[in-house]
Amino acid sequence: MRSWQVERRRRTRHLIELGGLVAKAGIVDLTGADRAMIYGALLWMADKLQSDDGEHARALWLAKGQKAFATEQKESKTPIVAQEYHNRA
């Protein structure tokens, strides 16, 4: 397999995992899968991260996400792909 194919598959897997997180958080159901609303929310997050309050938001969201992953892992007793990916980064 060529290097560009390997990189493309890696990127595709990464994007699928990120989309899975959007679904796992309930965003798809809460927005009725409205792409404009989801995109708007993501843009709001990006603005928040770039603001003076960005570091606080990062710390808060990271802690919340880590707690959710830990709770899920305890409940399911199975590895979480997204957490494994996060730990590689």
Image (tube, rainbow, N blue to C red):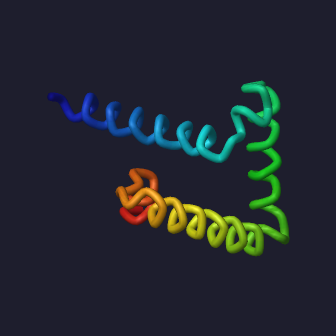
Please indicate, yes or no, whether residue 59 appears anywhere in the rendered image. Answer: yes
Q: Is residue 12 left or right of residue 2?
A: right
In percent of width and height, residue 41 lies at: 80, 42
Q: Residue at x 69, y 42 (%)?
A: 26
Image quarter for residue 5?
A: top left
Q: Against 62, is 24 above or below?
A: above
Q: Residue at x 34, y 39 (%)?
A: 10
In percent of width and height, residue 36 lies at: 80, 27
In percent of width and height, residue 79 lies at: 36, 57
Q: Which residue is most to the front? A: 75
Screen quadrant of the C terminus: bottom left
Image quarter for residue 24?
A: top right
Screen quadrant of the N terminus: top left
Q: Residue at x 27, y 31 (%)?
A: 4
Q: Against 40, is 81 above or below?
A: below
Q: Is residue 87 left or right of residue 61?
A: left
Please indicate, yes or no, whether residue 39 appears anywhere in the rendered image. Answer: no
Image quarter for residue 28?
A: top right
